[in-house]
Amino acid sequence: ERAQSPAQAAAAMDQAKSALLRAERVLAQLLVLARVDAMQSAGAVQAIDIAQDKTLSSSLEETVNAFKLVGSAKPDLLANKEALAEVTKEAILLSKASGDTLESSVNSLTGTLNQFNLGAEESRRVIDVLAAGSKAGAVAIPELSAGLEKFGAVAKANNVSVEQAIALQETLGDKQISGAEAGTQLRNIILKLANAGKGYVNGQFDINAALEQTKKEFES
């Protein structure tokens, strides 16, 4: 392999310094957000660990920016460096796997966690469900996220799991209904079925049982 010329080496050094300075600026913003001392922050050590994870192919600058995005979207994670790092890592993985922007993937992951009141330990489950749903159906991850914003809390309150919520959106996606429109329709459907007393099993609303009951009543 040909050695770099002095000019090339100097240019590479300047580029590395520039990237490090940008990462340091973003990290400084994260530290302000977290309101903690730099030596106690989640930022430096966790960011470097994730950036060195070869399965993610993430630069230090990108990783630190991901920390900032996740910290802004879920401020409660700023008090727990392990949870913050876990969600950040999964958001980067979702972005790499889906081809969506990092910001979009962070919003999809944290939005779903918030809507269903899930902890950081459920991050891998959420990104797997989003990715699998998008791959199997006609609705992209950002549209699934937009739909969950409209009915995720209602789904959670009525015993509808993340997996079921994604499957419901994919069903509507086959009819060219997606995003916020799908979410609004699903919110209304769930509330109507639950309030009508349909699909209750052992005292709990079951969306699959409710839909099956409604189908039988319609066909009879």
Image (tube, rainbow, N blue to C red):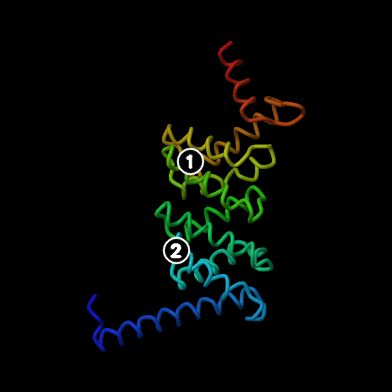
**Whether residue 85 is situated above or below residue 220 in the rendered picture:** below
* Rendered position, 96 above or below 167: below
In the rendered view, tell whether residue 209 sits above or below residue 102: above
Give the residue at x 59% y 64%.
85
Image quarter where the C terminus lies is top right
Residue 172: x %, y % from top left? 48, 34
Q: Which residue is mark 1?
A: 133
Above or below, 17 relative to 195 = below
Q: Quick one: label 1 or label 2, which is nearer the N terminus?
A: 2
Q: Amino acid at mark 2?
A: Lys
**In the rendering, at what x and y percent does residue 47 appear?**
54, 71
**Residue pointed to by mark 2:** 54
In space, the residues marked 1 and 2 are separated at their CA atoms by: 26 Å
Q: Is residue 186 left or right of residue 93?
A: right
| Residue in view at x 45 percent, y 56 percent | 95
Q: Is residue 133 left or right of residue 198?
A: left
Q: Position of residue 213 (x, y in %)?
A: 63, 20
Quarter of the image where one finds residue 78: bottom right
Extreme residue in the top direction = 220
Which residue type does callout 1 highlight?
A: Gly
